[in-house]
């Protein structure tokens, strides 16, 4: 079987890469010389790629909408139809010849081990990482650094971690570098150290009465740390007034936990509004594939948040999990994996009749937390949703609360 | 104050030293009757005669060796090696004799020898006639190396070299020869090895020398237009290096960029990067960056030649790369 490569044509003097707009033929189509195979956008115009041989178009076809260096192979023309050629193993060269956007800049990646990799060449010529890529004319050469700059940057500083200056500052300011989050470039810089130093302010106790220091339990310390970290979350609050009396009565009648019913209603609502299961990260929105609802519990050790994994499940399954979690809680056997990593939080202070309404703090890792208070004099219960405004907006919260109120009034469905 | 070109400043310096000290003699190829290939010895033959201005044959090893002997016997010879490219023939006299005799004689012999070497990448002279050898000379203990970038420094540093009792290499740059600048012959000179801050700045320290110091200054002008303030240091001396001036600047800016015309590998920039990392590690916000000539023989072709050595645009691009991370860091 003969195979003729189809290459990306050079359509103008300045053209170094082209973008395939679309393929007009598919693999297996019979081709005659002069047939238009594809359309290519050069740096100036859309042009047609014509066949220079008769035969059948064969893949792999280069992808559309990516920039491909000129003269790269974008397809093949074979002398037998695709069905027959498919039986024959493709030549090894076919795959690397197909340009991909990641393949193009590889010459620049080569000098990672500059001097060592080229021992056979004469000594003065060997450490010239920049000279080779220049000759290859990589795509976007207009923005490519000059050989001199490329040589300067080739070594670069690839070590992550903290800059020497940041380390020095951290030592002087008493900041623990391991507690800091790296900047966008993956390094801890002076800015991160200073932010940590200037961030949480601790009280000066010298001028007050004599005091003693009580070391916090690990749980309390973790909670304090989490809450402090949440300080920079841009938060807003939306409150709904809902008649929870029917749900309350039903739960009482069936000896069911109201919190669990609320958690399930939240999970059902999140299922319809998946943004509430996402969380903001510097790299983008983290969308989770499971809804894990944590329920805040008041314990002698402090606030703790056991997590109901996959809270969309039927109520009796959740009941079972919850009983197990409460057992561990009472025996102080709760492990970090039992109380960490929730995607949504529920805080219910409805057992305190004086609490008419309150705001909860959105914990790190969640987009939202629901604060449930006791019923007010009007018989309605205030449910306040605190939201990370980077993830959801006010109207999203309003829609979520509307859905939630529908689920909370469909008592029998919730109990299933 | 007068305005002189670089070669005129060197000529004035020679004239002044020859006038004030009869022990000063000049020797080299075409330095006498012809007045020097780069005109630096113009008029000296007529003024001081053939006993003090010696035309030599093409024999760098011999006449440099002769000058070493002359220096040992009390003269103050100034050798002109026509271009640095021919200094390779004189390396035995320089490295094995001039640099070591004071040490090996326990200080009984001084070495008041000055060796002038015009060099650097000139325009389209090809690989054998357009090179930098500072990395070779810097590695020789016992040699001092000055690299004047301005006519004033050329004047001062040549005079100081002639008066010094050590062997001093004056690395001139051929491209600077017709650069003009103010020269105050009456002003007192700073120590010959003292680096100078040619432009103050807060964002990065840009260290360079010889002609590249002027290129660095041009790049700093472009950077300033974008709000990046580079502190430009002209080293003036490669041996010894004025670490104090450099380190003070790096401690201020936290960023070090080195621009040199010599090749990267084992060059002056490598010494600067290592020496300043040792001295200023805790002040560095990023790894030092060097823009240097590619590790290649110099090309004859004009475009290739320009691409081989750093241009102001390259220094600007490297400065961007160096301070960019930090800018993002502060925004983040």
Image (cartoon, coloured by chain):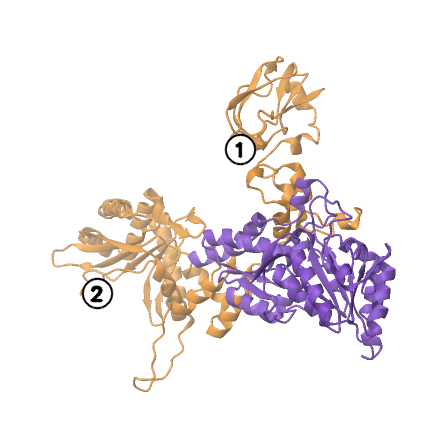
Label 1 – label 2 distance at C-alpha: 61 Å
Quick one: which residue is furthest to the front in this view? B46
Seen from the viewer's position, the closer of residues B309 and A151 is: B309
Q: Point out residue B275 in the picture as x, y percentages from the top left corner.
A: 65, 67
Secondary element at tag 2: loop
Chain seen in purple: B
Q: Is residue B4 left or right of residue B24?
A: left
Choose between B310 and A86: the one closer to the eye: B310
What x and y, as percent, mark residue B76? 78, 70
Q: Which residue is the site of mark 2?
A: A352
Screen quadrant of the N terminus of chain A: top right
* Chain letter, orange: A
Q: Provide residue A276's location: percent of width, then percent of height.
A: 34, 48
Which residue is pictured at 58% across the width and 14% down the height? A35
Sequence-first tag of 1 and 2: 1
According to the image, label 1 marks what residue?
A: A66
Tag 1–tag 2 contact (CB < 8 Å): no
Q: Is residue A180 left or right of residue B124?
A: left
Rate crowding at label 2 as few (under 14), some (14 to 19) or many (20 or more) other CA atoms within 10 Å: few
Residue A229 to residue A282: above or below: below
Residue at left offset 75%, top offset 60%: B44
Q: Position of residue A354 (x, y in %)?
A: 18, 65
Q: Are marks 1 and 2 on the same chain?
A: yes
* Residue B319 quadrant: bottom right
Q: Is residue B287 visible?
A: no
Which tag is nearer the camera, tag 1 or tag 2? Answer: 1
Residue B184 falls in image quadrant: bottom right
In the image, residue B54 above or below residue A280: below
User: Residue at coordinates 66% horizontally, 53% vertically from top-left?
Assistant: B177
């Amino acid at each position: 079987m003969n195979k003729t490569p189809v290459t990306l044509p050079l359509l103008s003097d300045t053209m170094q890469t082209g973008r395939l707009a679309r393929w007009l033929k598919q693999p297996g189509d019979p081709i005659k010389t002069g047939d238009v195979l594809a359309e290519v956008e050069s740096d100036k115009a859309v042009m047609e790629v014509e066949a220079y041989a008769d035969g059948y178009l064969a893949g792999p076809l280069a992808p559309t909408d990516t920039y491909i260096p000129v003269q790269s192979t974008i397809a093949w023309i074979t002398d037998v139809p695709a069905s027959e050629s498919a039986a024959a193993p493709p030549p090894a060269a076919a795959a690397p010849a197909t340009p991909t956007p990641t393949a193009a800049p590889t010459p620049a990646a080569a000098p990672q081990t500059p001097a060592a990799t080229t021992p056979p060449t004469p000594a003065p010529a060997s450490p010239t990482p920049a000279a080779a890529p220049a000759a290859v004319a990589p795509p976007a050469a207009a923005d490519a650094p000059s050989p001199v700059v490329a040589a300067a940057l080739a070594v670069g500083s690839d070590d992550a971690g903290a800059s020497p200056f940041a380390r020095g500052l951290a030592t002087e300011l008493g900041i623990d570098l391991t507690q800091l989050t790296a900047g966008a470039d993956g390094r801890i810089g002076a800015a991160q150290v200073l932010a940590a130093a200037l961030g949480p302010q601790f009280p000066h106790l010298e001028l007050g009465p004599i005091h003693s220091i009580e070391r916090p339990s690990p749980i309390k310390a973790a909670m304090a740390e989490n809450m402090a970290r949440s300080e920079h979350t841009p938060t807003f609050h939306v409150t709904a007034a809902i008649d929870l009396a029917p749900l309350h009565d039903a739960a009482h009648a069936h000896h069911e936990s109201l919190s669990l019913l609320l958690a399930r209603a939240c999970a059902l609502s999140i299922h319809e509004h998946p943004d509430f299961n996402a969380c903001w990260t510097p790299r983008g929105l983290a969308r989770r594939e499971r809804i894990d609802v944590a329920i805040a519990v008041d314990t002698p050790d402090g606030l703790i948040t056991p997590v109901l994994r996959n809270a969309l499940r039927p109520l009796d399954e959740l009941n079972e999990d919850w009983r197990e979690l409460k057992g561990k809680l009472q025996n102080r056997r709760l492990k970090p994996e039992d109380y960490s990593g929730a995607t949504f939080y529920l805080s219910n202070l409805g057992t305190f009749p004086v609490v008419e309404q309150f705001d909860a703090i959105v914990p790190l890792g969640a987009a939202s937390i629901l604060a449930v208070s006791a019923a007010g004099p009007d018989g309605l219960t205030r449910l306040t949703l605190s939201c990370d405004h980077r993830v959801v907006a006010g109207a999203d919260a309003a829609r979520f609360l509307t859905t939630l109120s529908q689920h909370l009034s469909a008592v029998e469905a919730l109990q299933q | 104050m007068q305005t002189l070109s670089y070669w005129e400043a060197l000529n004035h310096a020679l004239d002044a030293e020859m006038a004030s000290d009869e022990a000063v003699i000049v020797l080299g190829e075409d330095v006498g009757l012809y007045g020097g290939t780069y005109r630096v010895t113009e008029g000296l033959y007529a003024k001081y005669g053939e006993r003090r201005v010696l035309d030599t044959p093409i024999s760098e090893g011999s006449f440099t060796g002769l000058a070493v002997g002359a220096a040992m016997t009390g003269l103050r010879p100034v050798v002109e090696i026509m271009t640095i490219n021919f200094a390779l023939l004189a390396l035995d006299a320089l490295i094995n004799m001039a640099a070591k005799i004071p040490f090996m004689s326990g200080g009984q012999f001084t070495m008041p020898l000055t060796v002038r070497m015009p060099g650097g990448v000139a325009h389209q002279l090809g690989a054998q006639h357009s090179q930098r050898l500072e990395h070779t000379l810097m590695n020789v203990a016992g040699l001092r190396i000055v690299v004047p970038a301005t006519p004033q420094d050329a004047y001062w540093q040549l005079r100081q070299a002639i008066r010094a009792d050590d062997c001093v290499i004056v690395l001139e740059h051929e491209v600077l020869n017709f650069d003009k600048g103010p020269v105050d012959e009456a002003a007192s000179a700073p120590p010959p090895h003292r680096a100078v801050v040619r432009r103050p700045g807060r964002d990065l320290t840009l260290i360079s020398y010889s002609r590249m110091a002027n290129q660095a200054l041009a790049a700093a002008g472009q950077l300033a237009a974008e709000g990046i303030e580079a502190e430009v240091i002209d080293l003036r001396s490669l041996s010894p290096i004025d670490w104090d001036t450099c380190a003070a600047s790096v401690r201020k800016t936290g960023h070090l960029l080195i621009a040199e015309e010599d090749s990267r590998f084992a060059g002056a920039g490598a010494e600067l990067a290592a020496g300043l990392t040792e001295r200023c590690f805790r002040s560095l916000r990023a790894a030092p960056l060097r823009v240097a000539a590619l590790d290649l023989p110099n090309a004859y072709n004009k475009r290739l030649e320009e691409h081989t050595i750093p241009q102001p645009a390259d220094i600007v691009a490297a400065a961007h790369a160096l301070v960019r991370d930090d800018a993002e860091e502060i925004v983040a």
